[in-house]
Amino acid sequence: MRAFGACIIKLFLGQVLAVRQVKLGFNGPEVSEVCFGSLAISPLQGRVNFEEGAEILRYAIEQGITWVDTAEIYDNYEQLASVLKSYPDVRVVTKSYAVTSEEMALSIEKARKGFNRDVIDFFLLHEQESALTLKGHKGAWEELLSAKERGIVRWIGISTHAAAGVRAGALQQGLDLIHPIVNMQGLGIIDGTIEDMLKSISFASELGIGIYAMKVFGGGHLSSKAEVAIDFIKGIKDIHAMALGMSTREEVDFNLAILSGKEVSDELKNLIKAREKKLYIADWCEGCGRCLDYCPQRALYLEETVKVDHNSCVLCGYCGRACPHFCLKIV
């Protein structure tokens, strides 16, 4: 991972930590090498309440994190805005599943209103899989191009769980940023191996596109190897930054300590390990199966009621929004 510019210096357990600033591709801005992944504090995962999540975000910003990742589906604009109103320089990434120009225009306006900002820093098409899905979202992409030209969105891009999605996105007109799933075991990649994903990322990076990784810990499967998992991403020159989901102060401290190269105390390690997470399915599940279509990893299946393959689940929580009886959540 390439570092640029000055460092933001913070204090951690009596030690000086440096949150490095990195440049997102040829045209992107400088941001902290870690982006605050707000899915972990959103209603979609339900780990913390509104106020608790807001305080975690505030704490992360005070430690030097300069940008926040969200999405329309996370339903947390109000929560984030309650904090970001005090930090107007903190950049926002959001995403939409919009297909048509009209749908994307509504999504952009929803974000501008939700954050009380005239300009949204980054806006991405959510979960694009290939050139075919991008073609199907042509209207939405053209609206993003128009919004960028009009100055109400600064940089545009896609998020993806597919190596083919990265490669197709790299060829998309006007694209600045790609947010791919990537971790040392290739967990969650829907169309190939980690080697396939890294080749696609290299292709995109060589074209000057900014890359920031998601699911660095593989949805929690790699949490016991956190230092190795982060070092793997940092060692890939074509990846400029990473989004990390954090729902406690201890997780913020833990991740920033690893990124700074400082030794993490055993006490802090034990606190993090004690909070291992999984998808919980309540016993009142009626087996309607609606949630299956919302799982990008195909980790859910029906056996009278819904079951989960924990080895495939990456704890995105997207299934929870589809359940009419609120049976699914991350715990």
Image (tube, helix red, strand yellow):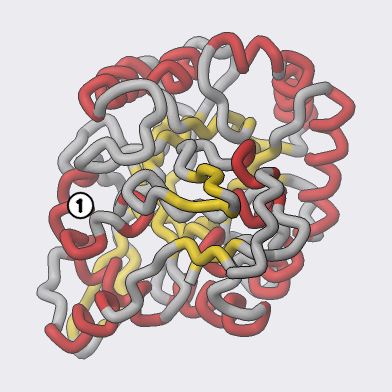
Residue drawn 30% across and 53% down? 217
Q: Is residue 319 visible?
A: yes
Residue drawn 31% across and 63% down? 19
On screen, residue 27 versus residue 93, left or right, reads left
Q: Quadrant of the N terminus?
A: top left
Q: Is residue 117 above or below residue 326?
A: above
The residue where tag 1 is placed is 229
Badge 1 element: helix
Amino acid on which disc 1 is placed: Ala
Q: Position of residue 243 (x, y in %)?
A: 42, 52
Residue drawn 65% across and 41% down? 95
Residue drawn 43% across and 68% down? 246
Q: Nearer the viewer, residue 127 or 208?
A: 127
Q: Quadrant of residue 34?
A: bottom left
Q: Quadrant of residue 133?
A: top right
Q: Is residue 157 above or below residue 274?
A: above
Tally of numbered discs: 1
On screen, residue 284 versus residue 113, left or right, reads left
Q: Position of residue 11 (x, y in %)?
A: 28, 82
Assess disc 1: are there few (<14), some (14-19) or many (≥20) residues with their C-alpha within 10 Å of its C-alpha. Answer: some
Q: Is residue 122 visible?
A: no
Q: Position of residue 277 (x, y in %)?
A: 39, 68
Q: Quadrant of residue 101?
A: top right
Q: Position of residue 126 (x, y in %)?
A: 61, 35
Q: Outermost residue toward the front? A: 304
